[in-house]
Amino acid sequence: MKHPILVLKDINKYFSEDFALCDINLDLYSGEVHIIVGENGSGKSTIMKIISGIVKSDSGHIFFHDQEVCIHSVYEAKKMKIHYALQDVALYPNLTVAENVFADRMPYTNKVFKSVDFNKLYYDCEVLFSKLGIDLDIYTPVRKLGFAQKHLIEVIKAYVSDAEIIIFDEPSASFTSIEKEILYRIIEDLKQKGKAIFYITHLLEEIKILGDRVTVLYQGKITGTKKVKEMKDEHIIEMLCMSKDKKCYPKLEVELGKTILSVDNLYFNNILKNISFQLKKGEILGITGLMGSGRSLLAKCLFGVENYSKGRIKVNDKFVTIKNPSDAIRAGIALIPEDRLNNSVFGCLNLQENISISSLKRFANKQVIDYYILGDVTGEYVRKLSIKPGKPEDLLWTYSGGNQQKMAIARWMMSRLKIYIMDEPTRGIDIASKTDIYNCMVDLIRKGASIIFISSDIEEILGICDRILVLNAGQITCNILRKEATKEKILFHAMSLSKANENKEVLSSECIFL
Amino acid sequence: MFAIERIRIIKNYILENHQAEVSALSTMLNVSEVTIRRDLEKLEKEGFLTRTHGGAVLNEEEEEDFLDMIDGDPADYNEISDIAVQMINDGDVIMLTNGIINRCIAKKLINKNNITILTNDILLASEISSSKTIKVVLLGGDIDFRHHAVFGTLTINNLKKFFVSKIFIEVDGITDQLDITVSSIDKASLIQEASHNARERILVFTAEAFEKYAFYKVDKAQNIGDKIITNSRIDDRYKNIIFNNNIQLFTSIDAFEGHV
């Protein structure tokens, strides 16, 4: 029997009446990924902060290689080869990608004078990136990168650090499937090298793909640690469902009108099969599923980014063919894409141009754009959606993810369409922007528009949708009303075992299409 | 068509409908939206109308309205009450505590059927007394002439006899710890009692309430309310706190122009 590399014994930490860690016992073996799950505020990050010396525990013992240690500071943790990849990005914005990646272990030509060997640095970085399959210019300063790319650099930093214990704190929150692939590859590689990994996540798919053991935290206490392989899906679902139901999603019930969109027998190559559903006026239809279930692909088909191979789409009782996005817009369909950096934000155009770009027709006066009125109207939208800082001449790449996303929604609201498809609109953004986006949705349905809301956050789906579709391996496995839906039901349909193998095929084939 | 002719048509249209949407006018007159917006701007300078988001409303010589009593922007109150009205269904029994937003809500309920309103606000009760579809129950008690409402032990005893499906509680101030404050002790005890007698409790206040501290503390927002309706310009900090305390936050974003 191997000895654990790290053991936490009876750790206590008191913060306030509402929040304290109580008798935490955890262990970690080398070559394993130990997943920590629990709702927000259950103490996941705090435990990791204790291990990495950011926070000091009130009582308890930490054993490192069977020896009791006291970790007083981040510096000591680093000396013990513990690396903590923070939830928030902590990079040097003005240094290049390569410099950031190797910030902790710069190659020196002269150790005494600390002169950096830049040739070696950039060469090493180039080799590393091509090995991991990352497509990033290593000479760009980090400040010019997007949110997800910065997170990816944090992950790569952890990869190159020669730490024995690596802690990942929700690294994939802002990742699209491409970055996730890279992340999973990195973690697999680290495991092979015999590193020990703590991994904090909310996502079921990550538990299944990455995890060796899972520990569940609930209100500062550990409720159980189990091996992933020995668990059935139902057990994982149960563990994830332990958290209380959240009621914080603003949901306005409006009277549903007639059917505005109906999709009949839609196929996309071999990936989407027999998709049929209806959307009513004023309805929010939620679509969820694991990564690779085809949820984003469906959105792309409806917006004409991908061409469906078979099937019929009816908008307002009229058949339409959607071959490209302008067909979709003409039919009244808008898409707010998942990957806002590549597909929706024009980073080097200013705010005013970004918002109005889909509705320039509204401001044309005999083929000439009336900038006075355009500025007036965009200003209104910026104010109403509290897009900050909100000066019309601001370039969009300087904005936070939340504000970029609000901009994307404002853009389509301005063009006054009937059907809004939102693909993961709230992923990786701050809570204040989230509430703004939910309230934009309230505004839309109140005024008669309809929404297809795609999300992997089941609480969110349960909170705001009228009806929920679950996709599994390109098929709709479940179509239920919000009142009848529960977390368990949705998770069960999203990952029923019989389809697990097919699922993998879809995953890889979707990656090709991306 | 000449500009003067067009403006005459717009004027007539707005006089008839009291308001107009830019998109509707532009389809009606078959000119671009930009042209309509320029026309409306001219008319606004004349003082004939006020431009709004996506349209315009007629400047009416109104009879004395309770909205005159406020110092803030009447649009704030309007937006909030628009969302609140959406939450009320035909046949509901609701309670409205005294206050300006709640009076706006009551005014907008005229189009609904078979609503019963329980209130302690005298102005509110008399305002909608003319409606045939709404039944109003006014609580009894000591009259507070400054607030045009009734309060006191009598009111609270009275209140205990009722149970409503939704209560809209208008409050005066809210701290960053989400402590709800109001301007009189009578109002505080009324709200406390009333919040027990409802299935769903909705707090309403304008964005200004966040910077305001009234003297009497009622309770934490999460203990007396399930939902909050307020204006969208509140600070991000507050959106954060409210969301994390498991309260549904409706900010009255009114961005989409017109209806589809």
Image (cartoon, coloured by chain):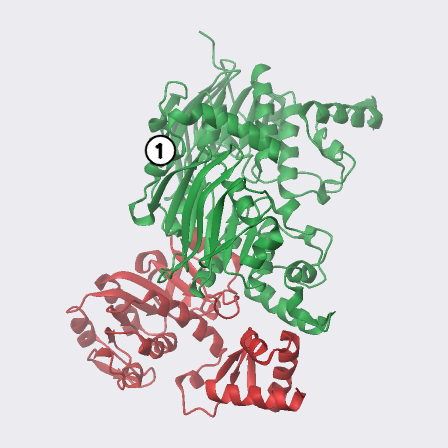
Chain colours: A green, B red
Q: Where in the figure is residue A395, as x and y percent of width and height?
A: 71, 56
Relative height, residue A122 to residue A423 (above, below): above
Residue A474 visible in rendering: yes
- Judged from this view, the residue extending furthest toward the left is B161
Nearer to me, A33 or A504: A504
Split into 4 quadrants, where in the image is the N terminus of chain B? bottom right
Residue at the spot 59% in from the left edge and 31% down from the top edge: A511
Residue at the spot 37% in from the left edge and 47% down from the top edge: A246
Relative height, residue A364 to residue A347 (above, below): below
- Which element is circle 1 on? helix
- Judged from this view, the residue extending furthest toward the top is A1
Residue A58 visible in rendering: no
In the figure, residue A380 lies in which quadrant?
bottom right
Q: Where in the figure is residue A440, as x and y percent of width and height?
A: 49, 59
In the figure, residue B82 lies in which quadrant?
bottom left
In the figure, residue A148 lies in which quadrant?
top right
Number of numbered callouts drawn: 1
Nearer to me, A59 or A208: A208
The residue tagged 1 is: A492
Write down the chain letter for disc 1: A
Q: Residues within 10 Å of mark 1 (few under 14, many from 20)?
A: some
Question: Is A351 displayed left or right of A323 in the figure?
Answer: right
Nearer to me, A346 or A43: A346
Question: Is A405 displayed left or right of A124 in the figure?
Answer: left
Question: Is A137 displayed left or right of A323 in the figure?
Answer: right
Relative height, residue A31 to residue B4 (above, below): above
Nearer to me, A448 or A134: A448
Q: Where in the figure is residue B6, as x and y percent of width and height?
A: 62, 87
Q: Where in the figure is residue A17, as x and y percent of width and height?
A: 36, 44
Residue at the spot 52% in from the left edge and 15% down from the top edge: A30
Kind of residue at disc 1: Phe
